[in-house]
Image (cartoon, rainbow, N blue to C red):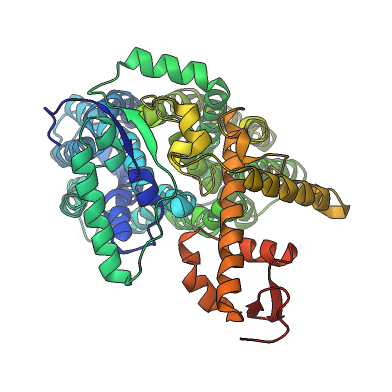
Amino acid sequence: MSETSELRTIRTDVPARLDRLPWSRFHWRVVLGLGTVWVLDGLEVTIVGAVAQRMTEPGSGIHLNAADIGLAAGIYVAGACAGALFFGQLTDRFGRKKLFMLTLGLYILATLATAGSFAPWYFFLMRFFTGAGIGGEYAAINSAIDELIPARNRGRVDLAINGSYWLGAAIGSAASLLLLNASLLASNVGWRLAFGIGGILGLGIILIRRSVPESPRWLFIHGREAEAERIVDGIEREVREETGEDFPRPSWSIRVRQRRAIPFREIAGTAARRYPRRALLGLALFVGQAFMYNAVTFDLGTILGQYFGVNSGHVPQFLIVFAVCNFLGPVLLGRFFDTIGRKPMITASYVGTGLMAIATAVLMMNVTLSAWQFFGLVGFTFFLASAGASSAYLTVSEVFPMESRALCIALFFAIGTAVGGISGPMLFGQLIHSGSINQVAIGFLIGAAVMILGGIAEVLFGVRAEQQSLENIAVPLTAEEAEKDFERGGAPAPSDEVSARVAARSARNLSRERRGVRRFRPGPGRFMYSPGMIGTGDRSSRTAAMADRDLDREVEELAGTLDRRGSTGRDELKEVVHGRSWGPGRFRSALRQTVRESRANRMTKNRYRPPGRDRER
């Protein structure tokens, strides 16, 4: 449908079709085209930080002093905040693809122009526009990725992509060793190459990005449902040819009233009225991670040099290890955000970071640490903190309606960076300047408190968003009869038999979990939900009820398949019911539940049969 077509009310199953897809080359293309910009950001920020000192030396080709370098860093951050807010609104209004192409283009032009800097005022101006491009990327990219990646993979993919910033930081730290080598590059060349490398890599990314489609979710809300259908048809055709699999029928649909544009005041007002607890959650998560990261990373080299005797020439080696620890955190822990769940993992990463920061502070006050002992503590602290920081972007992207997704990412990024990102470095700078390692330890204790508060906010306000459709987590503002739609899932309301079955299963699970050590298991727990509660309670009860209904459908499918086929191997059973498309760990959980309810009998380690069958068919 063209953009001039008449707007109307439609029912669409596009979100359900996107969420049921198995992982494929298309999804890798999305990751490479959109996610690699974080590598680029980490690469540039680290290289620029490393070569900044060279720009203050005679013969650098530009007259800057140490104060100018600090001012340029502040201007870059200010540009990122301004760009996030400005381009975030445009992303929600004009589409994900237009803006992620525009913001990357701005970044490329600005960073290449920075390489030709000839005066401080010009350098400051280009740093502002470079930051604006990166800030706009945060909003446009996270929105597009989450709307194109299947629900069962969204957590691990989003965390890995946001954490890839540190892969770029590790590469940048290594590259800085070459760029600072005076025997290889003249003092007026190395720093210019640092900026030029970022721009050239950006040109390569923009070529890959051209093949990434517009978000079908954005299209059908803005009156272009025919285009959304064509895009999804093409994705399904490509994935089907690659995997040779048939897809299960979409299990739900949603009814929306199309609109060209939604005023900012309506988006902000509606989101604030409907989701005040989620707003507090986003604020706590972003401020906590921004304070901890900006405070420590900006001053880590100074701490190593002033208190642990590390030569400035060896600092990049420590920074490489630091970046690797930060990269491994989201990559290794990301899958658990989809299996164990968002609430327990976000809580564990924030509170765990706080506890490690407390341990580091106590040891700094009471034990004489070597540089590598101190760095080992910091490395493990930020292994956890990196997963938590990445989950902040994931959380805000998931828990607000689609029409406000990019704006909310931009808003919380800007507030978190402005509050935590400014106060953290200022406080740590004063504590380091005191000359007392005990004062620096107090800074770690303050950072620990802020992170633990973020973990407490997750306990109180967190959402069970793992493996859930975005439209289930937060109903679009344009959805007509939204609560009714989600009560029915776009299909007939659950029967009394289904409701009774789910209620009985919830009661049994709750009783079992209250016995012994199971009651202390981390996570949101299970409650007495039933499908009839969908749309009648708060958002968390609806999300839990949808999860219970999905489990019931999966148990019934496993039991019915075994009843028809008789004795079946585990792998064969998984293939028949398309268990791979259910989500991480869900086939295993559903099969375990089927056995627990005596709907299936386990014959051997990997073979099952229906109950009452004493021999194989």
Left or right of residue 608: residue 107: left
Q: Is residue 379 visible?
A: no
Please give the name of the residue rendered at 53% of the width and 39% of the height, measured from the top-left corner.
Answer: 493
**Total numbered badges shown on the rendered structure:** 0
Q: Is residue 373 visible?
A: yes
Q: Nearer the viewer, residue 436 or 89?
A: 89
Q: Nearer the viewer, residue 535 or 40?
A: 535
Left or right of residue 527: residue 248: left
Height in image: 325 above or below 119? below
x, y percent for residue 179 = 27, 54
The image quadrant where one finds the C terminus is bottom right
x, y percent for residue 428 = 56, 31
The image quadrant where one finds the N terminus is top left
Please give the name of the residue rendered at 48% of the width and 53% of the height, measured from the top-left corner.
Answer: 152
Height in image: 96 above or below 210? above
Please give the name of the residue rendered at 51% of the width and 78% of the height, measured from the top-left corner.
Answer: 572
x, y percent for residue 30 = 29, 53
Height in image: 617 above or below 564? below
Q: Residue furthest right?
A: 516
Q: Nearer the viewer, residue 149 or 334?
A: 149
Height in image: 517 above or below 351? below
Q: Nearer the viewer, residue 549 or 523?
A: 549
Q: Quadrant of residue 67?
A: top left
x, y percent for residue 388 = 55, 43
